[in-house]
Image (spheres, rainbow, N blue to C red):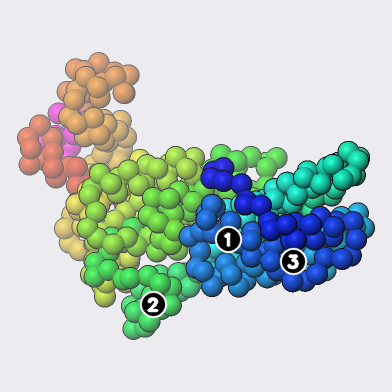
Amino acid sequence: MTTPKTAPKPLPGHMEAGLIAGTRTNSLAMSDLRGVARHLVDHFQANTPCGTLPGELLHGDVTEVTVKCLGLAVRMLESGKTPSDKDLANVHDAAARWAREGVPLRSILRAYHDGFRFGLTLVSRDAKAQNIENVTDNSLVLVSLLEAVTTEVSMAYVEEYRSVASEHHTATHTLVTTLLSGGQNALSTAQQCGIDLADEYLVIALHFPQHPDEANPVVDRTVSARRKLRRIQAELATICGKSPLALLSTDGGTVLLPAPREREWVDTLVERLSRAGEIPITATMTSAEREDIPGAAEHVYELLSLTRQLGRPAGMYRTEDLVLEYQLTRPGRGREQLLRALKPLDDAPELLDTLTSYIGHELNRQRTARHLFVHANTVDYRLKRIGQLTGIDPSVPSGLRYLQAAIVARGLAAAKQK
């Protein structure tokens, strides 16, 4: 918060005298309260963030609440009693109303604090007419009232803000569901949410593994999972704006982003969500026209399932990254022939392990040997043996591609049987 540019201008003599007198008697008239309130509101408008608010709000709603608070302050100074819930009802209702209208909480609290600062100034000006004990007592009463008002305003504002956010969250979920189902009323739903629909979207499927706390027997698994999800949602909102089009659960979900986006930006998005959730997130993505989102969503979830079946590391995957693997999931004679190609190695698992490691280490004999804890010559021997048993030579590019496809097909078939 910034410091006010200037202190409130002094009240006209009769107003100030009336307000000070009102701290000791019940003589302060309503007209005096309204005069002081208008004076304060003029100061708010000139010197605080409230100055950005519409004039009708300042000189209407804000003035009325200021009058109520001034009256409450006078009554407390006279009686020394703590304000009741009924006394603070106007403060509560106004804060809730302003939260729904989008008035910044910072502006509201700043206005209250400025008002109370002004009240303390008046009390100190009256120090010559009172003994120091009375001045101290009055100051403590005002500080207590400020505490009560600040607490009430903050609670009411946050409660209403959460309600508004929940309504918008529900509306956003409805919009995402409509887009994913190919509903015809997406435009009207978007208008209700205040969201402009794009013509093309990136359709992203996400998988969230368990956070380590979810596997901890002494920690509540449900609480840990929800905390993980909240951190991811907060980071997504930070990156994409307050209302990203997303349907997320503790296990993952779908995000729709207006296209196009740079490849690096999307990769960074997944990395940041992973850091926020403290988990390695796997994501798959494709782009689609708005009316084609349902089919695109089905496709990316097939890709996501594929990455998990293959045991791929976390990260972002696109169709081109999995084109061979994806095609091999399609039934047909070619796939059956690939499955038969490795049958001769069923009784020699060390040969299949060598072939898999050799391909996984980008055909590097030395790295393959280190991974298998064998000599490089042993790798050469096993590759030659694979060629003899299968009739497919892994030392030539065409044979290697065939065997690689066969390994993928075999892995997919094994995963499907689990």
> Along the horizontal axis of the image, is 387 left or right of 135?
left
Q: Can the viewer see residue 104 in this picture?
A: no
Q: Report the residue marked by disc 3.
A: 33
Give, as a single range, the part of the protein colored magenta: 383-393
Q: Earlier in the sequence, mark 3 or mark 1?
A: 3
Which sits in the foreground, 324 or 277? 277
At x 30% / y 41%, what residue is drawn? 346
In the rendered image, residue 356 lying in the magenta stretch gets the answer: no
Mark 2 secondary-structure assignment:
helix
Q: In which quarter of the image is the N terminus?
A: top right
Of the pair 397 and 137, the residue shown nearer to us: 137
| Spatial separation of the CA atoms under disc 3 and disc 1 | 14 Å
**Amino acid type, residue under disc 2 in the picture:** Gln
Instruction: Return the residue at label 1.
Output: 42
Task: Classify residue 12 by image quadrant.
Answer: bottom right
> Disc 1 marks which amino acid?
Asp
Between the residue at mark 2 and the residue at mark 1, the CA separation in whole angstroms equals 37 Å
Q: How many residues crowd around disc 3 within 10 Å: few (fewer than 14), some, or many (20 or more)?
A: many
Q: Is residue 342 visible to the viewer in this orientation of the structure?
A: yes
Crowd class of label 2 (few under 14; some 14 to 19; many from 20; radius 10 Å)? few
Q: Where is residue 24 in the image (x, y as percent from the top left)?
A: 90, 56
Of helix, strand and loop, which one carries label 1?
helix
Q: Find disc 2 in the rendering and name its residue.
A: 191
Pointer 1: residues within 10 angstroms few (<14), some, or many (20+)? some
Q: Which residue is at a point 54% across and 73% down the rendered structure image?
A: 56
Q: Position of residue 70 (x, y in %)?
A: 76, 62
Element under disc 3: helix
Q: Do the residues labelled 3 and 1 touch (CB within 8 Å)?
A: no
